[in-house]
Image (cartoon, rainbow, N blue to C red):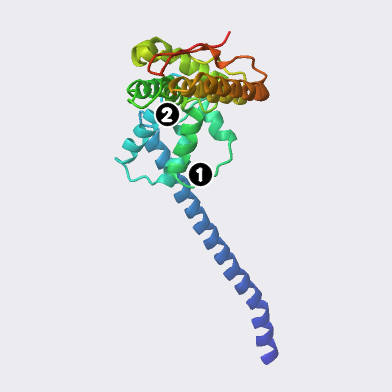
Amino acid sequence: MITIIQHLHKSIQPSVVMSSSTDSSDRNNRESSSDDDYYYGSWRNVFSIVQKWKATFNGDRHESIKDFLISVKSHQQLTDLGDSELLEALPCLLTEPALVWHRLIPKEWTSWEHFCEDARNVFRHSEKYNLELLEKALARKQTEDESAIDYVSELHRLAGSGCANQTLVQQHASSSAALRPRLSELVEEQEAYEPPPAPEDSTVYRNWLTIHRLKVYVGRMKFTPEVEGDVSGMIDEKLKEKTGDRRSVSGVSFSSSGGARRCYRCE
């Protein structure tokens, strides 16, 4: 009798275990399915919210990345979306070529601010952004102790600061074209400014700027003719050593007060 009961017990036990295992597996599957449904349902809800925003950006030169980022944040403040959800939903707000950029670069943004920083660096060349920079540059007045070369160099820097992806030659060409119509109004007549030539590379341009500053300095100081000649010759030699340029400071004319009236670009 005991043998029969033991036999029945052994024959029933595996099926009970199997049934229990099956129930557990089904329960896990249901829980996993429920989690997936919640996850995808949640993101579908996020995308449906973001797609209704009137904020898109394609990255061309006629759109402002600054306006886009401000618009996105203003829309976000009207919802309960977090920054992480906003980052995930970015494809809904971008169109080509900005969307292509988003897909190709490594996704290493750890915060919304991180994304904004990258986006500004890449798309800051927009026409509207450059106009804002130009207005900022033109609003800057020349100070009493600031030479024309220093003043206009700073204007070039401000107006060209939105051209981070351009070469120095391109930056100079862009800022020169934008500033040239107003330079005659902005720079004092008694200290006429001759704009620098478009640089062939950064080294040539920086050397030119250094020499030009020295020209103005020499023109302002009340040197004796002998010292003046020595300083001018020293500058010419340094210029030839660095760039092979044959220009000299002989084009600097002097006023009776010792100030430089104008600096010619050398013959």
Question: Which residue, given by chain and number where applicable, does mark 2 sit on?
Answer: 65
Quadrant position of residue 86: top left
Q: Which mark is residue 62?
A: none
Dot 1: what SS?
loop
In the image: residue 264, left or right of residue 73: right
Q: Position of residue 99 (x, y in %)?
A: 52, 30
Q: Position of residue 48 (x, y in %)?
A: 40, 36
Dot 2: what SS?
helix
Q: Write the residue at 39% across / 10% down.
A: 181
Q: Residues within 10 Å of mark 2 (few under 14, many from 20)?
A: many
Task: Please name whichever residue, 91 or 228, is drawn nearer the observer in this view of the structure.
Answer: 228
Please, is residue 127 above or below residue 19 in the view? above
Among the two numbered marks 1 and 2 on one chain, the one whose residue lies closer to the N terminus: 2
Q: Can residue 47 be seen here?
A: yes
Please name the amino acid that badge 1 sits on. Answer: Trp
Please, is residue 96 above or below residue 250 in the view? below
Question: Which residue, given by chain and number where applicable, does mark 1 sit on?
Answer: 109
Q: Residue furthest left?
A: 78
In the image: residue 148, left or right of residue 212: left
Please name the amino acid that badge 2 sits on. Answer: Ile
Task: Please name whichever residue, 258 or 217, is drawn nearer the observer in this view of the structure.
Answer: 258
Q: Write the residue at 39% across / 30% down.
A: 66
